[in-house]
């Protein structure tokens, strides 16, 4: 998923969660409460994915970053 797609999904889930909170304010419904928990967990995953994707786009693939860091470390030890 692209950052824009992830962000759109976050917005959609946030709106759903808001509607569920409004339904929950009408009275305690365990099913609604569970659904809110599921959405909250999914939102956490999406925010993490968004941060990781933005970092990947900015700095490159993780393996490439690790490879560069190890090369720099070897150069520092050699100096």
Image (spheres, grey):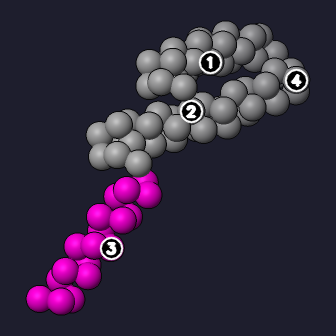
Mark 4 vs mark 3: in front: 3
Q: Residue at x 66, y 13 (%)?
A: 16
Residue closest to the eye, 77 or 41:
77
Image marks 2 and 1: residues in contact by CB distance under 8 Å? yes
Q: Position of residue 63 (x, y in %)?
A: 44, 58
Q: Residue at x 57, y 18 (%)?
A: 9
Q: How many discs appear?
A: 4
Indicate the quadrant where residue 38 lies: top right
Dot 3 corresponds to which residue?
A: 70
Image quadrant where one finds the N terminus = top right
Label 2 packing within 10 angstroms: few (<14), some (14-19), many (20+): some
Indicate the quadrant where residue 72 lies: bottom left
Image quadrant where one finds the C terminus = bottom left
| Dominant secondary structure of the residues highlighted in magenta in the image | helix
Vertical comparison of 73 with 41: above or below: below
Measured Cα–Cα span from mark 1 to mark 4: 17 Å
Dot 4 corresponds to which residue?
A: 31
Label of residue 13 in the image: 1
Q: Which residues are magenta?
A: 62-79
Label of residue 46 in the image: 2
């Amino acid at each position: 998923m692209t950052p824009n797609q992830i962000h759109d999904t976050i917005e959609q889930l946030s709106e759903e969660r808001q509607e569920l909170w409004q339904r929950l304010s009408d009275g305690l419904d365990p099913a609604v409460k569970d659904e809110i928990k599921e959405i909250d967990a999914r939102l956490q995953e999406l925010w993490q994915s968004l941060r990781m994707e933005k970092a990947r786009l900015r700095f490159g693939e993780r393996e490439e970053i690790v490879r560069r860091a190890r090369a720099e470390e070897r150069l520092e030890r050699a100096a």
